[in-house]
Image (cartoon, rainbow, N blue to C red):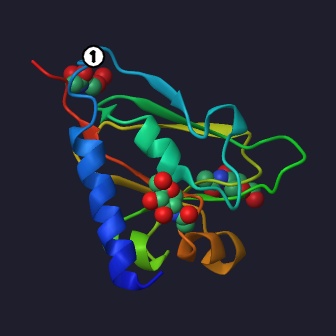
Amino acid sequence: MDAMTYIRGIIVLVVITCVAGDSEPRSRSRTILVGDSQGWRAGTNYTQWAIQNSPFHINDTLVFKYPQTGVPVAQSVYLLPNMWSYITCEFRGAKLLGNATDAGFKVELNQHTPYYFASAEGNSYDCIAGLTKFIAVPRPFPH
Ligand SMILES: *[C@@H]1O[C@H](CO)[C@@H](O)[C@H](O)[C@H]1NC(C)=O
Ligand SMILES: *[C@@H]1O[C@H](CO)[C@@H](O)[C@H](O)[C@H]1NC(C)=O
Ligand SMILES: *[C@@H]1O[C@H](CO)[C@@H](O)[C@H](O)[C@H]1NC(C)=O
């Protein structure tokens, strides 16, 4: 996949996460388990998961859990500073949110900004392949 195709894919995703779900307005924030019962794993396409769980809203809480056994574990979760670092998998300036020594952790989406999550596993191999990363764009609740 060349870079432009990838960037177009990202832009489509951001647009989807911004407009999806208008027909079902909610007024309460959710607690959402990232990856559902599978948790946070290496080599997994979380973009699909993010689309299915969109839209995200302000004050929704994302819960990251590491699976116990039997699957490749993605040790780290980083919050990247912007879309460019997300696309290029540049982890300088990224914030480590959790690693395999943590049982799991929560992130509250309390800012009006896209959240760029990615694992740095295998020298960013997953990230560069477009895996074990996703964008959450919290929206305000409808009035
Ligand atoms: C989000 O949470 C903060 C702090 O608890 C609260 O002040 C704010 O009103 C909440 N925003 C929404 C949209 O619920
Ligand atoms: C990562 O692992 C270390 C122990 O090696 C631990 O002290 C730290 O709290 C963990 N989490 C983060 C977010 O750094
Ligand atoms: C992940 O899933 C999304 C949505 O189905 C798709 O557009 C994207 O190409 C997939 N990425 C990879 C690396 O398979």
In the rendered view, tell whether residue 113 sits above or below residue 85: above
Q: Position of residue 40 (x, y in %)?
A: 66, 47
Residue 119: quarter of image: bottom right
Task: Tell which of 135 and 94 is nearer to you.
Answer: 135
Q: Is 104 placed left or right of 96 in the picture? A: right
Question: From the viewer's perspective, is residue 56 above or below residue 78?
Answer: above
Q: Position of residue 135 (x, y in %)?
A: 40, 53
Give, as a three-letter code, the residue at label 1: Arg
> Is the residue at mark 1 in contact range of ligand 1, meaning its CB lies under 8 Å from it?
no
Indicate the quadrant containing the C terminus: top left, top right, bottom left or bottom right. top left
Q: Is residue 79 visible?
A: no
Q: What residue appears at the point 71 percent right and 59 percent down from the top-left corner?
A: 42
Query: Which residue sits furthest left?
Result: 143
User: Where is residue 72, by image quadrant?
Assistant: bottom right
Which residue sits at x=33%, y=81%? 4
- Is residue 24 visible to us here? yes
In depth, the one of 116 and 92 nearer the eye is 116
**For the point 56% across and 70% down, which residue is it?**
127
Left or right of 3? Residue 48 is: right
- The residue beneath circle 1 is 26
Closer to us: 129 or 90: 129
Picture quarter with ligand 1: top left
Q: Is residue 113 above or below residue 93?
A: above
As drawn, the residue found furthest toward the top would be 27
